[in-house]
Image (cartoon, rainbow, N blue to C red):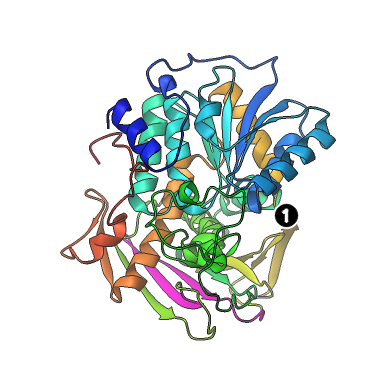
Amino acid sequence: MQRRDFIEQSLAAGIVFASTAHLVNPRPAYALANDKISICAMGVKGRGGHVLQSFMGLPEVDVKYVCDLDESVLAARVAMVEKATGRRPQAIKDYRQALDDKSLDAIVIGTPDHWHALPTIHGCQAKKDVYVEKPDGHNIMEGRTMVAAAKKHGRVVQMGTQARTGPHLLSLMEYLKTGALGKVRFAKAWESAKQGSIGHAPDGTAPAGLDYNTWLGSAPLRPFNPMRFHGNWRWFFDYGTGDLGNDGVHRLDMARWALTAAAAAKGEVVPEMPRAIASLGGKYYFDDDQEWPDTLMTTFDFAGGYLLTYEMRVWNAYHLHDEPEGAAVHGDQGYVIIGNSRWRAFDPKGKPVTEDKAGYNDVGHVKNFLDCMRSRGKPNADLETVGHPSSLLCHLGNAAWRAGRTLKFDKETYKFIGDDDANQYLTRAEYRKPFELPKIADL
């Protein structure tokens, strides 16, 4: 799209974006060894607010901008940063305003899933590094485009799967490298942390101070409904990826990581992408406005003889292997159970062998990102090699559930084999103007 066309369409939609000159004259590579790292925190209501706290608590970080489309949230977070740091960040609604600032180093994205892709891509184009919450995007094509943008512009992009920096997960990988599990062929992940019903609500009027049109972004234009807004957006096809992409991405990432490490100890390589995906389940429990399933069983089959399953039942809190949510990897010489704060190893007869306890490491994950901004190395949850492959599992599982059949995936074409109907779930049917997905490469 030409710049003039973009601006005209933006004005027609009642949206005013800042200059896009940064796309033409990107900031050159920078050295940050002795400087504060300046960030723009975008989408700061829920999880994004927690991520903002992790960044602002570090002395090497300068929160220069806080960006949110909800004025009440924006004011509260600006005040929070000022109180904690003694510095008042600039409050903005349009993240492009921050990207035009050549002194800005990174953008931190805590928005709903359907607003992960565009800021990441635009940030990379503007030569900013990016910290983006999981999953990588709203769909498979968005994730691929995000990766392409990061590669093309040489950016550090960290995804918010914090377990990748968790001390107990790092110690688990060292244990798995010993080959203690023997020959591994099976892993599983599960989610049984109880969620509640969101109920039913009629359409209404968007709250004062909310730029609802921009909040919808690339999603179809619909009347405002409180059940599709703060917090609950993740349960709707237009904006979220269900609990598979919400919490499941963490557990699948742990399972995939552990399975890969255990196989590597025996000189084997687990393919990055599955060749077949089956997903059964539905809304079996809740009578509410949610669209994504509350009960789900998904299976991923990998070439070479590896199976990964995901079990989700968000209407009860019964633990599996004494973990409300977690992962497991099974070999012929033992198995491991992985939770959010510990891992336990067992021998073939189920006798405990060893364990370690620690927990997630939000601040450490942020520090890893900042360190890699300076070194230009790959962060622990690098988008291309970690974030996208694990997010892809969630998108593939959701596609198989929506298609209602087993899907075969071609890693070379990034399409479902012989199934044009299922290929509709690779991306949106249409991106609402002016929020189209940029074309970065021949994807």
**Residue 425 appears in view:** yes
The quadrant in which the C terminus is found is top left
In the rendered image, residue 93, in percent from the top left (x then y), is placed at: 57, 38
Q: Nearer the viewer, residue 215 or 269?
A: 215
Q: Which residue is mark 1?
A: 359
Q: Is residue 235 left or right of residue 434?
A: right
Left or right side of 346 for 332: left
- Answer whether residue 245 is magenta in the image: no
Q: Secondary structure at mark 1?
A: loop
Q: Amino acid at mark 1?
A: Gly
Q: Main secondary structure of the magenta part?
A: strand
Q: Residue at x 49, y 60 (%)?
A: 245
In magenta, the rendered stretch is 293-318
From this view, report whether residue 295 is shown above or below residue 122.
Answer: below
So how many labels did they put on this image?
A: 1
Residue at left offset 39%, top offset 30%? 151
Residue 227 versus residue 319 in the image, above or below = above
Above or below 346: residue 60: above
